[in-house]
Image (spheres, rainbow, N blue to C red):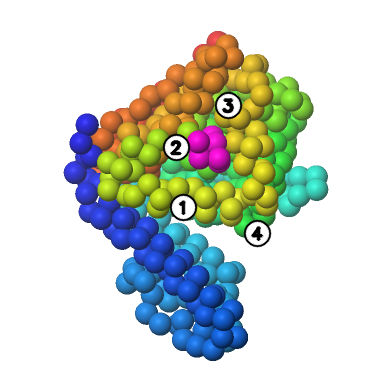
Amino acid sequence: MPLDPFFSERLRVHRRYLIGQVLEAARKRVAGWRALLWGGAGAATTDATPASTDQPTVRRTPQGRADPQKARARHRRAALAWDRKELQSVGTPGPDVRTTEHEVPVPGHPSVRVRMYYPDAADAGPVPAWLSFFGGAFRIGGVDYPTTDAANRRRAAEAGVAMAAVDYALAPEHRFPTQIEQAHAALVWLHQNAADLGIDPDRVGVAGTSAGGSIAAALTLANRDRTSLPIRLQLLEVPVTDLTGRHLDLRATRALGIPRFIALRELSSVARTYLAQKADRRNPLASPLLAASHAGLPEAVILTAEYDPLRGDGAAYAARLRAAGVEASAVQYLGVTHDTAIFTGALASARRWHRDVIGALRRLHED
């Protein structure tokens, strides 16, 4: 169906951003060639006006090289500011629920912070728990982002479950498999400390959005092959399940007027940031769709969006699970895009998405 009118202006801005990224990358390559051919002569002049007026000027060294750490820091500050504005303008604030903070050790990797969100029902005894992983292309985001925090609060309160939000490390400072090892350590910790945390270890699910969906799906594989701890259900929202890009559905991007090469470039950028080696794209813990077997995994609920190239990843993953004898449902929301779930203050489809998520979370209360 046609794209919901709500997204029209957002699409125009997003297209401009993507094109600006391509032009900026081309400008960097030209500057690099000039530096190589003429020993850096003129390279420092690349502090000129950025390719898009929406993009900040990138500070450069005297040799013309951008400082990647400072650039990432600026990008993340901008993303956090954008997220805060989105919650205020088109989102729904979360209720005041009880939260606790925990630091979980991860053998051989940085420890990971886990924030627990509790419903009122937690005072009456152990409640089901969902281990939750945020989205952000593996390189931005976190449990402190306003829309993520608000969603966890609403989900805990409305579904009557504890949300255990994992603040996994971001790439490229920490690359794969750090995030998977942190996720697995968090799962083990959740089970080992269930009594103290006030949760029912036999009613645990894993949930993730976008990149977080990849981590959640990979965690079910790691758990099956290492620890076999009870996981009742996996809830995957617009997940990326194949970093080779073979299952991207580029009809979605064409319908948005985004050229194929730009969509592929974006996925390639995500994979390069997250993975230390190109060969890791075929590692099942990076691309869960490519696992040799999906037998014995938890039942899955997968939500995708019509105008999202990752709809192909979600559909293919559901099909692979079903072929392995795993119960899996896949629902595609028509007329909407990848980030629909955050727009509950302005979009009917987002509110329906939220209600469907609450229904899935509540299933952990069932016998």
For marks 3 and 1 on the same chain, the one whose residue lies earlier in the sequence: 3
The CA span between labels 1 and 4 is 21 Å
Kindly report which numbered mark, 1 or 4, lies closer to the viewer in this rendering.
1
Tag 1: residue type?
Arg
Q: Is residue 363 visible?
A: no
Answer few, some or many: residues within 10 Å of disc 2's Cα (few below 14, many 20 plus, some between 14 and 19).
Answer: many
Q: Along the horizontal axis of the image, is 168 left or right of 156?
A: right
Q: Which residue is mark 3?
A: 205
Tag 4: residue type?
Glu
Residue that sits furthest to the bottom in the current view = 41
- Classified by dominant secondary structure, the portion drawn in magenta counts as loop
For marks 4 and 3 on the same chain, the one whose residue lies earlier in the sequence: 4
The vertical placement of 12 against 231, above or below, is below
Residue 265 marker: 1
Q: Which residues are magenta?
A: 237-246
Query: Which quarter of the rendering shows the N terminus?
Result: top left
For marks 1 and 4 on the same chain, the one whose residue lies earlier in the sequence: 4
Q: Along the horizontal axis of the image, is 43 left or right of 290?
A: left
Residue 275 marker: none
> Where is residue 202 shown, x and y percent of the image?
65, 19
Q: Does the magenta-highlighted stretch encompass residue 244?
A: yes
Kindly report which numbered mark, 4 or 2, lies closer to the viewer in this rendering.
2
Q: Which residue is mark 2?
A: 248
Kindly report which numbered mark, 3 or 2, lies closer to the viewer in this rendering.
2
Q: Along the horizontal axis of the image, is 275 left or right of 235?
A: right
